[in-house]
Image (tube, rainbow, N blue to C red):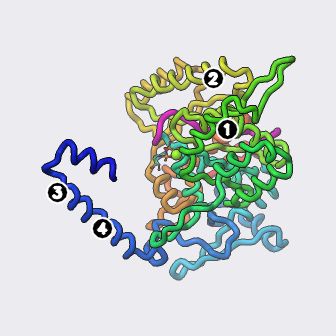
Amino acid sequence: MIQSSVIFTLTFHKHFVIYEVRGGNYMESLISTAESQNPQTSDSPYSANDTQSQYTLQIKLRSSVVEEFFDVPRMKIHRWEEAGKIQAGHEEHGSRKIRYFDAENVRKMVDLLGRKQNVDGTYTYAIWHNKGGVGKSTVVFQLATMMSTLMGLKVLVIDTDGQADTTHLFNAEQEVPLDTDDFIDQRSICDILYDLMDPHNHTEESLKESFEDTKKTILPGLDLIPSDDRVVELDYDIRELKGKGIITEEKGDESFDLSSVALLKKFISFVQETYDYDVILIDCSPDLGDMNVNVLFAADCLLIPVELEPKAPHSLKRVYNRLIKLAKMHESFSFEKLLIVPNMNERHDVKAVVQTRIRDMLPNFSSRITLTKTTTVVKAIGQRLPIFNYQDPNAKWMAKIPEPAKRLTNELWDLCHEMLNLEEPKPDHHGLFKPKGITNAQ
Ligand SMILES: Nc1ncnc2c1ncn2[C@@H]1O[C@H](COP(=O)(O)OP(=O)(O)O)[C@@H](O)[C@H]1O
Ligand SMILES: [Mg+2]
């Protein structure tokens, strides 16, 4: 503010007074608006959460949808309920009483059906692109909720984006009232990495404490390490670690300093060895700052969502060259799997041409899945619901999932399988989970 006033005084002296008056009025009105708002009573765009719940998200799959999803007869579900193996919840909708199953009971059903997926070790995926708005956070949200609830897997999401969109989507943001000067003091990935900058904190107990104090449980089988806006400072502080000898790698007689690139890897290796997560999904900011170099070092697999716009192949080529450069610089930099996934696809000639160009350019890394653009995903996220739990609130019977939501559910389902090298689900093949009602949605 002071700086801009000085510049203004020097260059536009005559207008200085007007500027100050305008600026003053504007700020005053901004502050008084903030003060007049009571965040406790303001309408939230999100559905109200059960304050009693130990989880930050709530999934309620209607029993008719569960039957359709799992291709399981109603009688079978009733028998499990009678035996006390699962429990339905109930909700009044006008004169209708709707039965639903929460995430915990859906997971139990997946287990009872023998459809819990077996995953070897821990898949650690970075969801990254050098570009914003391609759907990274949306994809992370959808994959994490689907893998944990519908596949019965244990998932950890790590938000490393300073925008903390994923933390927000998972309803895991610390609430700071707008009418106070308080700042967020919830622990985040930043605290974990700052802890690690002191080698004394590299012991198993310290790492465990750092992780347990930061982790938030979102749903059964789904934990989150939140982020916050200190990532920008952290990025700079990580760079300053170069050559400090905090993390080194010995090769023969030589010692290599990896302090500024392997800080996150140190933490993730500990989590992989100590806990039984099947999948770790890391959401990233759209840049190649030092935090993201750390993410790329720590991840074993990389998923790049892209929008099929004309310049997409060029951006991807740059990303690809950057990865090659990092791999040449550091021997320990490698990926087991790299998947380029087009998102927000529409039936359009240009999109098809761009997709073909990407496939021709990087054939080994192009996912077989394309995610469709649909406003249902935006609406679902607005209610903090995964797409497979989205129901049009205006639909009369509220029991059916809209076709576009089914379609995207299907695509994400196939993507989960591709990511985790699981057997491809075949329609109508007994013993394999392919939601019956969703199979014919294409
Ligand atoms: N398949 C999709 N169909 C429609 N809108 C989508 C889809 N995927 C993402 N979006 C929307 O695009 C916007 C950007 O997505 P976001 O996940 O925040 O991107 P990023 O994390 O890459 O910046 C959001 O408004 C999101 O709801
Ligand atoms: Mg994002």
Which callout, 4 or 2, points at the residue further toward the start of the chain?
Answer: 4
Which residue is at the front of the view, 418 or 9?
9
Q: CA distance from mark 4 to mark 1?
A: 46 Å
Query: Where residue 35 sits in the image (x, y, percent)?
Result: 39, 74
Pointer 4 or 3: first along the chain: 3
Q: Which residue is labeled 4 in the image?
A: 28
| Separation (CA) of disc 4 from disc 3 | 15 Å
Mark toward the viewer: 1 or 2:
2
Q: In this orientation, does residue 245 appear?
A: yes
- Name the residue carrying label 3: 18
Q: Which residue is mark 1?
A: 125
Is there a contact, CB below 8 Å, between mark 4 and mark 1? no
Label 2, secondary structure: give it. helix
Q: Amino acid at mark 4?
A: Glu
Picture quadrant of residue 58: bottom right
Query: Is residue 22 part of the magenta span, yes or no?
Result: no
Rendered image: mark on residue 326:
2
Give the class, few, some or many, for how many residues have Cα within 10 Å of label 2's Cα (few <14, many ≥20). Answer: some
Of tags 4 and 3, the one toward the viewer is 3
Q: Amino acid at mark 3?
A: Ile
Q: Is residue 52 left or right of residue 312?
A: right
Q: Position of residue 103 (x, y in %)?
A: 69, 62
Inspect the image, locate mark 2, and give the three-letter code of the amino acid beneath it.
Leu
The answer to which of 194 and 153 lies nearer the viewer is: 194
Q: Residue at x 26, y 59 (%)?
A: 23
Element class at badge 4: helix
Q: Is residue 417 left or right of residue 46?
A: right
Q: Nearer the viewer, residue 209 or 164?
A: 209
Q: Nearer the viewer, residue 159 or 312?
A: 159
Q: Which residues are magenta?
A: 121-133
Q: Secondary structure at mark 1?
A: strand
